[in-house]
Image (spheres, grey):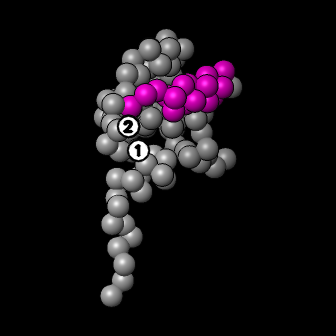
Amino acid sequence: MLRLTWVQPEDLIGHELRQARLDGRNASAVAARWRAAGGREAPPRAGASTAPASPYLRLLARDLLDELADLPSPMAETEPTDLGRIRALCPHWPSPGP
C-alpha cells in the first residue's frame, strides 16, 4: 500500500506543531492533546511515517490541524496572508517594466 504524507493528517500535525512554534503561535494545548492521545512527533524526514495511525488519531489530527490554523500569529501584522494587506505593504509591486 502506498501512503502519501500530504494527505495524512497524522503525519502533517507534527510538522504543523513545529511550524507553529517557529511562528510564535502558542500551540502547547494542541500539542498536549495530540501527545495524550498517543500521537507521534513529525516524521524525521519528509514522507509518511512508517505505520499508519488509527482512525481515531487520523480524525483527531484533522481537528487539531483546523485548530492550529485558527491560532493567532504574532507575525500577522508584518506578514499578512490576505492579498489586500500584502499589496498595501508592497506599494511598488509589481514594479512597472522598462
Q: Is residue 66 magenta?
A: yes
Q: Amino acid at mark 1?
A: Pro
Going by the picture, which residue comes out furthest to the bottom?
A: 98
Residue 90 point in image, percent of width and height? 34, 58
Is residue 55 visible in the rendered image? The answer is yes
Looking at the rendered structure, the secondary structure element under dot 2 is: loop
Q: Residue at x 67, y 47 (%)?
A: 1
Instruction: Confirm or deny contact between disc 1 and disc 2 (CB under 8 A).
Output: yes
Q: Is residue 22 left or right of residue 53?
A: left
Of 33 and 92, nearer the camera is: 92
Q: To which residue does mark 1 refer?
A: 80
Going by the picture, which residue comes out furthest to the top?
A: 36
Q: Which mark is residue 76?
A: 2
Q: Residue at x 36, y 78 (%)?
A: 96
Is residue 18 visible in the rendered image? The answer is no
Q: Quadrant of the C terminus?
A: bottom left
Of 90 and 32, nearer the camera is: 90
Q: Residue at x 48, y 52 (%)?
A: 84
Q: Residues within 10 Å of mark 1 (few under 14, many from 20)?
A: some
Residue 58 point in image, percent of width and height? 63, 28
Q: Amino acid at mark 2?
A: Ala
Residue 97 point in image, percent of width and height? 36, 83
Report the magenta residues as a range: 56-73
Q: Is residue 97 magenta?
A: no
Q: Is residue 85 above or below residue 15?
A: below
Find residue 45 and report its image quarter. Answer: top left
Looking at the rendered structure, the secondary structure element under dot 1 is: loop
